[in-house]
Image (cartoon, rainbow, N blue to C red):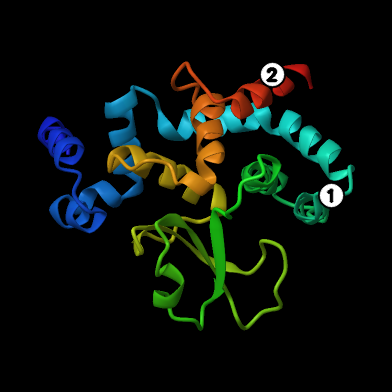
Amino acid sequence: METTFSLRRKEIVQDQPLVSTIKQRWPGLFFEEEVCAEFFRINRIDLKTTFLTSLDNHTQGLLKMYRAKARQGRWNNLDELLEKLDAQTTDLTTYRRSAVLRGLPLYLREPASISKTIKDTEALGPHTKAMKMGILEVTDSSTNSGPYSTVVNVAVVLEEEVVMDNLGDFTNALMMLFGLLYAVNMEYPKDLRYTFEAIQKIIFNLGKECTARIHSLKNKLLKV
């Protein structure tokens, strides 16, 4: 993959092929190790280390901001998210990371959700249809549903196709999705543009200019 990078990058950027075409041509690009490697080739940034370290550094501040917003009484989804987090007693780092990332589109007033949850007895097709990009979380239908506890598979969807699965948890899946957007040269979805911009500008510190909404978020984080 290293030796074909220049050719691959030129072809992807100039020709803008479908994701299915890219996957057929370079199937190795859709493995975790290669997503990280490709992200480094493009940005000279370690995807996994930077993402997790920066996310952990901002977790306390973002959760504090979420709680302040939830107390205003008009943010039921944020309140629900925080209640689920507060109910956890083990593996708190994993749950905090997930809560921070799930809370971003809610806090930023995005019109869409970044993930969709289905049962393992359901067919994937109807759920990936019309899904330009996102995360699919599959839960075990034989157990009682509860926050986080029944997830048996987490997959990344691009252009209606599952391109990566068995990613462990939501945080890892979102990290892979973000890395893949660079690898296949896809624009952020319009209905989640601020969420992905926040990840780019705040978590990865990539790029100088940012929208007023993300600039405001950055300033608030400096004050909490």
Q: Residue at image x 32%, y 28%?
A: 40
Which numbered dot is residue 12? Answer: none
On the image, the x and y values in percent for residue 75 come to 80, 49
On the image, the x and y values in percent for residue 176 come to 42, 45
Circle 2 Cα neighbour tier, 10 Å, few/some/many (<14 / 14–19 / ≥20): few
- Quadrant, the C terminus: top right
Q: Is residue 82 above or below residue 194?
A: below
**Label 1 amino acid?**
Arg
Q: Residue at image x 60%, y 24%?
A: 212
On the image, the x and y values in percent for residue 107 come to 70, 41
The image quarter in which residue 202 lies: top right
Q: Is residue 110 above or below residue 151?
A: above
Residue bearing the label numbered 2: 219
On the image, the x and y values in percent for residue 53 come to 57, 29
Q: For the residue labelled by badge 2, is the local secondary structure a helix, a strand or a loop?
A: helix
Residues marked 2 and 1 touching at CB (< 8 Å): no
Q: For the residue labelled by badge 1, is the local secondary structure a helix, a strand or a loop?
A: loop
Which numbered dot is residue 74? Answer: 1
Drawn side of residue 119 relative to residue 132, left or right: right
